[in-house]
Amino acid sequence: MRTLCFSLLLALLMITACKDEGEPKVAKSIESMKNKGLPALAIHGGAGNLKKLNLTAEEEAEYHRVMKQALETGYALLKEGKSSAEAVVAVISILEDSPLFNAGKGAVFNHDGVNELDAAIMNGESLDCGAIAGVKRIKNPIHLAKLVMDSSKYVLLAGNGAEDFASENGVAFVEPSYFFTEHRWKQLQEAKEEKDMKLDHSGLNNTDPDAEKKFGTVGCVALDIYGNIAAGTSTGGLTNKQYGRIGDSPLIGAGTYANNATCAVSCTGKGEDFIKLSVANDISSMIKYQGISLDSACTSAVQKVKDFGGRGGCIAINTNADIAFAFTTTGMFRGYINAQGILKTDIYK
Amino acid sequence: MRTLCFSLLLALLMITACKDEGEPKVAKSIESMKNKGLPALAIHGGAGNLKKLNLTAEEEAEYHRVMKQALETGYALLKEGKSSAEAVVAVISILEDSPLFNAGKGAVFNHDGVNELDAAIMNGESLDCGAIAGVKRIKNPIHLAKLVMDSSKYVLLAGNGAEDFASENGVAFVEPSYFFTEHRWKQLQEAKEEKDMKLDHSGLNNTDPDAEKKFGTVGCVALDIYGNIAAGTSTGGLTNKQYGRIGDSPLIGAGTYANNATCAVSCTGKGEDFIKLSVANDISSMIKYQGISLDSACTSAVQKVKDFGGRGGCIAINTNADIAFAFTTTGMFRGYINAQGILKTDIYK
């Protein structure tokens, strides 16, 4: 009987191994080491067709600099004994304060020329989570998302209501003009022209006008010295978005998810597809029910997005300090500090 | 080798069987029969502590009458060849038009004395979905959710933006006063008093003030003669809710999900817990990755909600016309017409 059990286990392990091998390699596995109470974290700053950005060497260096600063800040806090959720807020706040990314200061404009910001955070130990959608005067949406998690009985607050909650809880407001950047304003005008063109020459314009319009969502996943993971995501959503559209970023299970039993995930990409496929929760479910690795789960989820006609990527971490990145695009702003303290930032595939 | 494979398969089947057997029986399996192009559907009108409602025989009869009317209307449409999504809209519209349920006409009031309505619909064949949150002047939110699915490139629209979309697409508006019912107004005053009491006598009031405040969310899952399933949910959310709170109902993967490969699900209960556990997507994932039955997946998901300290229930259907109901509470308004054309409505456990 014991031999049978052993054979069974061995066979199962072999099946799992074969399965992993057979999966498409969209992602790169970065780290896989046992956590010894050492912290680790990873970030993304959006996935997309990076060739279109035509970054100069100086611009590239600036992206690397801000990502490094964010990672080092988060890592120092984790080392000090701050929780993974606290580190996620500090890291994302830095990315929100930079005009480089589509979140906070650098958020894109909606159709009405207004910046509507979404963010979410989730604690993998308790499954507590907080999210906000469509706020217009909050400097650091990720901070407000954590306040919703910590100080309300709700998970998701939207629009003016979310700002009322912020106001009652002493969050400082900024003028909507704080979010004005010339670059994003120009993108809105281009998007509007594109839309007009598309209406005028329906069928002639075969490019997806949304392809690069959500570029630059930011996210962070972290493991603290207590062995708890957390995930957060912050975005300005789609350039030229209308009708109070909410994307995947603030939706728990779609763009953001964390559970100590599986992983912490933050996604970026065409949000509607990530909602339809419940990408963040799907990664968690594959780990839980199929027993596959973090890296295989991320690779598989992102491949499903691609097969579905979508685009984007994700970052993930687990309590073993494994870190995974996966994306369908030619690049994703990303970086990590692993449990060995090694820092790396990357842009292209 | 062939014998080894066979033994392995047998062992795996035994493990799966044992696992199902060991799971707690929160749900009742209603139907399990092969679909032969015959339609089927199921509905819920909320799960909760029904003893508190103290329904008279006349009131009970009225609940049964409206549920029967909704089921028969949906079934007739499915028989005629209408899609599962079309049937879901027709069925939920009837429940929304009744003052009995916390959706449409009978929606509860938020803290400001306003009715804020949420709804979602998802098509299991294409994974197309549409949802709206926080609308105040739309008679049938489920109709608007379908319009978002069919006529926009977005999934989730919130607040005034969602109403702008409705307006541009010719949806008729009602005055907010349409949603006034004496019963719900009284509930709001009671909830506000309870909150004051709780603030005044903190610690003395040990009952969960939210226990019955989301009671009456409605949902429908349907299978059409083409073998496609769909799910929809509509709600007024929590009595006395604040800050533009969005619950699980309009969130794809939390309160609503549909995928022909697994199932169509609609949930009801304390929304925040359903979001944290991604209940609807979890049911789909268990079927997909664990290969368990629809009934076992619903039972397991609802047990997880209970273990997490939450309460509520779900209904589900698959392309085999299996129908499942599961709930943690003493009752759930529910009913079905199965593939044999048999109609049944129920209230208590």
Image: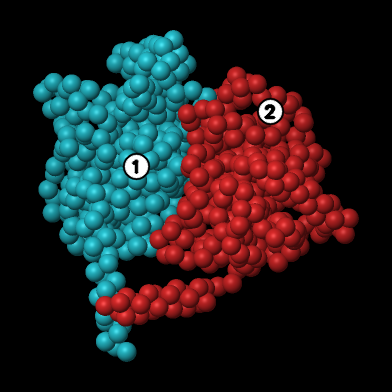
Chain colours: A red, B cyan
Mark 1 secondary-structure assignment: helix
- The answer to which of A8 and B290 lies nearer the viewer is A8
Left or right side of A156 for A115: right
Q: CA distance from mark 1 to mark 2?
A: 39 Å
Seen at 52% across and 77% down, the residue is A21
Task: Say which chain tag 2 marks.
Answer: A
The kind of residue tagged 1 is: Asp
Residue that label 2 marks: A137
Query: Residue A12's spot in the image, x, y percent?
Result: 39, 75
Query: Residue A150's spot in the image, x, y percent?
Result: 55, 31
**Residue B335 appears in which quarter of the rendering?**
top left
Q: Do the residues at pointers 1 and 2 share their chain?
A: no
Total marks shown come to 2
Query: Residue B11's spot in the image, x, y percent?
Result: 27, 74
Left or right side of A59 for A339: left
The kind of residue tagged 2 is: Arg
- The answer to which of A85 and A1 lies nearer the viewer is A1
Q: Are marks 1 and 2 in contact (CB under 8 Å)?
A: no
Seen at 29% across and 16% down, the residue is B183
**Residue A178 appears in which quarter of the rendering?**
top right
The answer to whether residue B237 is seen in the rendering is yes
